[in-house]
Amino acid sequence: MISAYLDFIRIRFLSMLAYRMNYYTGILIYLVNIGAQYFLWGAIYSGQDGLGGMSMSQMTTYVAVAWMARAFYFNNLDREIGNEIRDGSVAIQFIRPYPYLVVKIMQAFGEGLFRLLLFSTPGMLLVWLLFPVRFPNDPLLWAAFLSMLLLSFVINSQINILTGLFAFFIENSEGMMRFKRVLVDLFSGLIIPVSFFPGWAETVLRLLPFQAITYLPSSVFAGRTEDIRIWGVIGVQLLWLALLMIPIIIMWRQARRRLFVQGG
């Protein structure tokens, strides 16, 4: 069974090679986004030593790694699941001898692995050449960050699965998917670090899973989080990974009982 899952990862990885030019141009788009945020935050700081618990140097590193990490953990599982529900192909998946949702995550991981190797890695090298990004020297910190990045992928995938499964219960989940994407980008700390929100909003966001996707891993990489708290950050991610499994299992069981195919 494990070899079958590895095949799903490999097949999706190889299929992405056919569209690799899209990702090369995507690197330029991400560089523009990072550059725009770098100059924006430079104007906001205006020579100040620090804001929101970050120095300008840390903010530059945070912005760069947050956007490049997004290239890895981002996926369209919600849209894929929604489309398969609408066209009826999900019914065929039900009779196949493997867990449907696990296969979807494996396929998304294959895509994410492609982006990590051919998008994020060369993209970070370009960012390092163009902007004052400071990479950590401690190999243990790199290992911890890669572990956090993997957990970010899983948590983001779980949120996408939950959004996609709503297509079982409503006829059109397109609006919900767009709302979810804006919500994740904003509340995860990709656009604005969580520490820059007002006190009450920061407290609320720390009770939600979004910070575990971008804010916490990027803060560790940028040096904002002390080494002693790294395991605490991983613990928060593992906690949300476990908690998000509960609604996924509940929704999946309910969805299998009321499959409503709109086409096919």
Image (cartoon, rainbow, N blue to C red):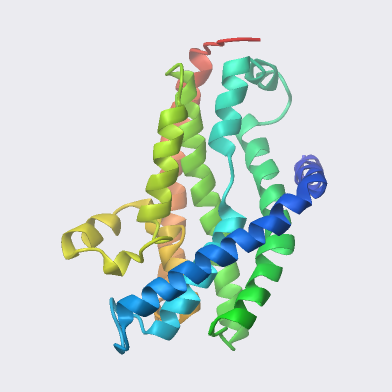
In this rendering, does residue 248 appear at all?
Answer: no
Is 109 on the left or on the right of 52, as rendered?
A: right
Q: Nearer the viewer, residue 13 or 196?
A: 196
Q: Position of residue 55 (x, y in %)?
A: 36, 84
Is 221 on the left or on the right of 40, as rendered?
A: right
Q: Which of 163 and 56 is in front in this view?
A: 56
Q: Is residue 224 above or below residue 105?
A: below
Position of the N terminus by quadrant? top right
Q: Where is residue 102 in the image (x, y as percent from the top left)?
A: 63, 38
Residue at horizontal 77 percent and vertical 52 percent from the top: 20
Q: Nearer the viewer, residue 68 or 136?
A: 68
Q: Which residue lies furthest to the left in this view?
A: 200
Residue at horizontal 72 percent and vertical 58 percent from the top: 24
Residue at horizontal 39 percent and vertical 83 percent from the top: 56
Q: Where is residue 217 in the image (x, y as percent from the top left)?
A: 48, 68
Can you tell which quarter of the image residue 196 is in? bottom left
Q: Is residue 116 above or below residue 248?
A: below
Position of the C terminus by quadrant? top right
